[in-house]
Image (spheres, rainbow, N blue to C red):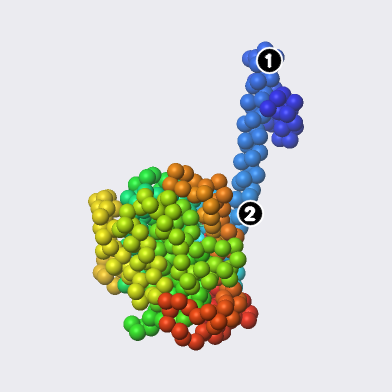
Amino acid sequence: MGCVESKKIIENVTNSDIKTVYHIEDAFFEKEVKCELRVTEAANLAEKIKLDRQINKNNKYKTKYDARILAKYDVLALIGKGTFSMVARVENKQTKQPYAIKIIESEEGREAFEVELAILRRVKCPYIVQLIEVFESVDKIYMVMELATGGDLFDKVQSRGPFSEKEAVNVLKMVLEGVKYLHNLGITHRNLKPDNLLYYHPGSDSKLMITDFGLAHSRRSADDILMQTICGTPEYVAPEMVARQPYTNAVDLWAVGVITYILLRGDFPFFDEDRIRLYKKILRGKYSLSDEVWVEVSENGRDFVRQALQVDPTLRLTAVEALRHQWILATHQSPKRKQVCRSESSGGGGESWSRRSSAHSSRSLRSSHSSRSGPSSSTRRPPSARVLPHHLESLEGALSMHGTPGIPPTPLLHHPCSTRHPPHSSWER
Ligand SMILES: Nc1ncnc2c1ncn2[C@@H]1O[C@H](COP(=O)(O)OP(=O)(O)OP(=O)(O)O)[C@@H](O)[C@H]1O
């Protein structure tokens, strides 16, 4: 930045700031140095202005927060926005411990948020983002959560390219432990994907945590195992859901199969820009395990993918079986990661949770050239993250003509919301 530009900046700031600059110049420096100093000062001033603007922006942002939150936390920055929510990084004023706070204010989002909240209140597992405390006001809910600072698995695959088998297994062990825990509690996530798997910290030994329970389903009784709502992210939805059949928590394992494929191949097993063609591919369950990347993957690794991507959900691996699969067992868990998930019903977890709480797009990795050697330049995140019922409606004709290989024929379900296309939050569960 030259002197002319720095002057421009100085002109934009307050009189007292300008005086300070001239005072230093006059007292100590020759002209040339003065100019440099002015640039430095100007840069500082520019920084100050930027900071002021940021503070103003944050202040504006802070008005969205309940006074109870502002009394306890400093709101530091916006992390991201979801369909109905906003997540910000906050810091506990006393302990300086950073957290993420999720806020929702729209009526439509509130319903989904309440489902998410009810589920998060029940879980305590190192591989699931932990809820710390909740604030509710008339029109908003605020969830203070564990902060994940390492980015998500999608970004990791995108920046690094496909994982080695050992790395993939390490990831999958954590995800499967989380999924096993959820399934034991009768919870089906229904939106597992690399975007919803967050690294706790940026280090290479970071654990992964499952997040985003906005589409999750919690069963009401032991025999209430079938779900009907069509939801999720197109590239990850299981064939039985596409076929509009009642489905079980096996849909999560299908998603684990898709994630495994992505980790090892750096690309989707099923992909098409056209949703109908994508769903037809999923229904057929046809994907490639034979190109140059897969040749490098062990037979055990390929077998794991095949067992997770079984079109027939009754033949698909369960989370427990997946954790016992030879490929997963072959890579030993490091002692650091050996953590136990506890539920409120399993003793200590629930109690410590109550104590603590009272105290305080889908995207696409699509690349025709992706390889193990590096990330693809054409990787990108598709804008939409949800399956809408009408996407599947137009499949009905195609399905009734061609049938659904691998899935026993049952009549297509009528979706109660299929003509209104409501947000996922209000769909029948
Ligand atoms: N505990 C957390 N720590 C760090 N980042 C988080 C945390 N929870 C959510 N995020 C990030 O905040 C952003 C918004 O998340 P949010 O759950 O509100 O919406 P989403 O899941 O991205 O979108 P949608 O709700 O539409 O599916 C995402 O980038 C998400 O990765």
The kind of residue tagged 1 is Glu
Q: Which residue is mark 2?
A: 60
Give the quadrant of residue 221: bottom left
The residue positioned 60% from the left and 60% from the top of the image is: 383
Instruction: Residue 315: tell me if it is visible.
Output: yes
Instruction: Residue 197: tell me if it is visible.
Output: no
Percent from the top left, x then y, of residue 421?
Answer: 61, 76
* Mark 2 surroundings: few (<14), some (14-19) or many (≥20) residues within 10 A: few
Q: Which mark is residue 32?
A: 1
Label 2: state its secondary structure: helix
Left or right of 295? Residue 333 is left
Percent from the top left, x then y, of residue 427?
Answer: 54, 78
The foreground one among 359 and 51 is 51
* Mark 1 surroundings: few (<14), some (14-19) or many (≥20) residues within 10 A: few
Give the quadrant of residue 198: bottom left
Q: Quadrant of the N terminus?
A: top right
Percent from the top left, x then y, of residue 302?
Answer: 35, 59
